[in-house]
Amino acid sequence: QKEVEQDPGPLSVPEGAIVSLNCTYSNSAFQYFMWYRQYSRKGPELLMYTYSSGNKEDGRFTAQVDKSSKYISLFIRDSQPSDSATYLCAMSADSSNTGKLIFGQGTTLQVKP
Amino acid sequence: ETGVTQSPTHLIKTRGQQVTLRCSSQSGHNTVSWYQQALGQGPQFIFQYYREEENGRGNFPPRFSGLQFPNYSSELNVNALELDDSALYLCASSVDPGQSNTEAFFGQGTRLTVV
């Protein structure tokens, strides 16, 4: 069993839809939870990170962490075609969010105009 | 675009050969991490270098080795290449490990194909 599980999709939604992306994990030592976006032929870029449990909002993006269920989510409101990319969840048990990151498989999202 | 640059962008090697990949970290960063991303998979941590010393290693065999130089740029060396080594190799630069509220910036990666 992988430490981090993520449905690879693909997920296809119409423009303006609310998108929900999720990951589950097994290692209770994880304390940093990140969401990265990766466009084709590019490196991942950090969207948001959360320390421990709770919610965090940044514009159209909301990240949620439920440590009791070992479940994290990323919501994208008013999705745009430019949001079409692969979304990777990542987690760390280190003392920062820049140490050894354990990534999910990534979910491919397509937002259709 | 991040300030992390990787070279080359693409290369093709034959099984059994050796390869060296290079990464220039972002200005002000002293830590470089290397990841392997197979097609359709998430990145896997290979190792991290902090101030020229290895600072953590993932589940990769010893034929994967690295270096960090005084200017904090880094190399990833892979010996005795295998077909399964074909992947996108990513480096990420960051500030001191353990510092919170920071971010690791990824380069665009080197696409390695082993034939």
Image (cartoon, coloured by chain):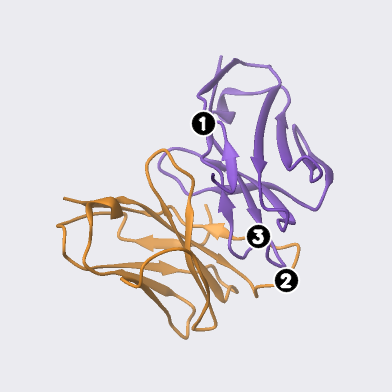
Q: Residue at x 54, y 44 (%)?
A: A1
Q: Are marks 2 and 1 in contact (CB under 8 Å)?
A: no
Q: Which mark is residue B103?
A: 3
Label 1: which secondary element:
loop
- Is residue A88 visible in the rendered image? The answer is no
What subunit carries mark 3?
B
Q: Position of residue B75 (x, y in %)?
A: 37, 72
Mark 3 belongs to which amino acid?
Answer: Glu
Q: Are marks 2 and 1 on the same chain?
A: no
Answer with left or right where residue A17 lies relative to residue B73: right
Q: Are marks 3 and 1 in contact (CB under 8 Å)?
A: no
A73 versus B99 height, above or below: above
What subunit carries mark 2?
B
Q: Position of residue A52 (x, y in %)?
A: 80, 53
Q: Residue furthest bottom?
A: B70
Q: CA distance from mark 2 to mark 1?
A: 32 Å
